[in-house]
């Protein structure tokens, strides 16, 4: 009898564990990445839909690789997958790898030593054990997952590493091919684990963009949300990383960087950084949004500003609110330096998923932007920038 009871308990534990690992990650993702779209969808006119189909669209920032979904399949949760991106006529999506997030994460101040949210998520998703205890391996596992999907569906998906890759993608799409380009980025420089040699490792794995910090100070320098405050700038290691990124043709992303780090990067001759996902402080006075004077200086050095889709950076929850932030960005830095940086699947709520991106085209038309301005913002500026920055090659 005791043996039967013991076996029954073991079976129950196994079933419980199986149910947890099957359903818990999806539940977490649904709760973290809601879509606040009306049941009937946002209205899109025939004129806006027609314009949207003609656009070359690019987005600087999505965190979908974090959630361990099969992005080759149209999903019922989250904001992006490859079918939905193609439905939304996206040509190029930057996917960033999230590797560490402090417990109690906020926009004001976070400790680098706080318990990490990503470790239990990776364990719960049953990711490879090597990624449980190494930030570098955590980034590489996400990159490997993207590479696997590209190999499974080469007719659908291309990983963009060079100017030649980008030019070929855009030419094929202009010729009518239904294909999506994806570029790899890192949400913060901490996967380098303080070792410059790891930049070569990430580069070889396909990474072409890296944010220097995320929500906490790291070996490269200070975060906008770290304990060092605005005075924590670029460290000596950070200077080495920036120089190596410039040499490799990698995009330097200052989203989440402290004001002093922004100053330090801008002071380096030849830097041309971007802000991948942000809002404009004058339009939305959130601590998440860098002060406007620094944003303008980034643009003045030839960088572009990616406007996000979530309420904390645009102070609203509709396509019209995103369009208002884009108008504010154009007023601040000019129409040649504004682009999209959705932060899709980045633990934020948005008013539409990737399949319904035409709602933003409609909102920009309603806000009074001309068709040439819309074409620049929706992707033209991003493509021009990447054609200059990415390493040469085919």
Image (tube, rainbow, N blue to C red):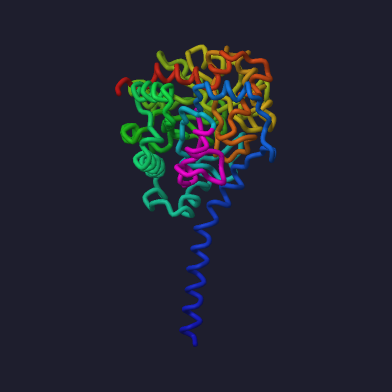
Is 237 colored magenta in this rendering?
Answer: no
**How far from the left and from the top, in percent, is residue 179?**
42, 31
At 41% from the left and 38% from the top, the residue drawn is: 191
**How far from the left and from the top, in percent, is residue 45?**
66, 25
- Quarter where residue 272 is shown: top left
In the depicted structure, whether residue 53 falls above or below residue 67: above
User: With 260 as the anchor, is 207 left or right in this view?
Assistant: left
What range is drawn magenta here?
Answer: 60-87
**How far from the left and from the top, in percent, is residue 182?**
42, 32
Question: Which of the pair 162/198 is nearer the observer?
Answer: 162
**How far from the left and from the top, in percent, is residue 64?**
50, 40
In the depicted structure, whether residue 47 falls above or below residue 134: above
At 49% from the left and 22% from the top, the residue drawn is: 56
- Quarter where residue 250 is shown: top left
Is 66 colored magenta in this rendering?
Answer: yes
Confirm whether residue 211 shows in the render: yes
Confirm whether residue 243 shows in the render: no
- Quarter where residue 173 is shown: top left
In the depicted structure, whether residue 6 falls above or below residue 121: below
User: With 30 as the anchor, is 57 left or right in this view?
Assistant: left
Which residue is most to the bottom? Answer: 1
Q: Quadrant of the C terminus?
A: top left
Question: What is the number of callouts on the image?
Answer: 0
């Amino acid at each position: 009898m005791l043996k039967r009871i013991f076996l029954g308990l073991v079976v129950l534990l196994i079933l419980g564990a199986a149910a947890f690992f099957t359903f818990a990650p999806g539940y977490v993702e649904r709760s973290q990445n809601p879509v606040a779209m009306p049941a009937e969808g946002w209205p899109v006119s025939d004129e806006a839909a027609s314009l949207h189909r003609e656009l070359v669209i690019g987005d600087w920032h999505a965190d979908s690789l974090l959630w361990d979904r099969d992005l080759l399949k149209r999903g019922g949760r989250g904001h992006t997958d490859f079918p939905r991106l193609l439905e939304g006529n996206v040509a190029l999506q930057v996917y960033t790898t999230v590797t560490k997030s402090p417990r109690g994460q906020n926009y004001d101040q976070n400790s680098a030593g706080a318990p990490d949210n990503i470790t239990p998520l990776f364990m719960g998703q049953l990711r490879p054990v090597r990624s449980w205890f190494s930030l570098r391996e955590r980034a590489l596992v996400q990159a490997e997952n993207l590479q696997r999907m590209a190999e499974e569906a080469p007719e659908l998906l291309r990983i963009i590493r060079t100017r030649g890759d980008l030019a070929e993608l855009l030419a094929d799409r202009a010729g009518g091919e239904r294909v999506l380009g994806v570029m790899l980025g890192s949400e913060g420089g901490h996967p380098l684990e303080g070792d410059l040699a790891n930049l070569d490792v990430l580069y070889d794995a396909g990474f072409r963009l890296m944010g220097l910090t995320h929500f906490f100070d790291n070996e490269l320098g200070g975060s906008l949300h770290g304990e060092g405050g605005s005075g924590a700038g670029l460290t000596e290691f950070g200077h080495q990383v920036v120089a190596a990124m410039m040499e490799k043709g990698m995009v330097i992303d200052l989203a989440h960087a402290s004001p002093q780090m922004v100053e330090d990067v801008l002071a380096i001759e030849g830097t041309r950084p971007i802000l991948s996902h942000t809002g404009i402080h004058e339009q939305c006075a959130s601590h998440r949004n860098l002060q406007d004077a620094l944003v303008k200086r980034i643009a003045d050095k030839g960088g572009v500003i990616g406007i996000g889709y979530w309420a904390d950076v645009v102070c609203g929850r509709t396509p019209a609110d995103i369009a208002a932030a884009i108008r504010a960005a154009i007023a601040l830095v000019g129409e040649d330096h504004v682009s999209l940086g959705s932060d899709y699947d980045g633990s934020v709520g948005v008013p539409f998923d990737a399949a319904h991106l035409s709602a933003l085209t409609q909102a920009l038309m309603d806000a009074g932007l001309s068709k040439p301005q819309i074409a620049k913002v929706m992707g033209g500026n991003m493509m021009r920038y990447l054609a200059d920055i990415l390493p040469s090659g085919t």
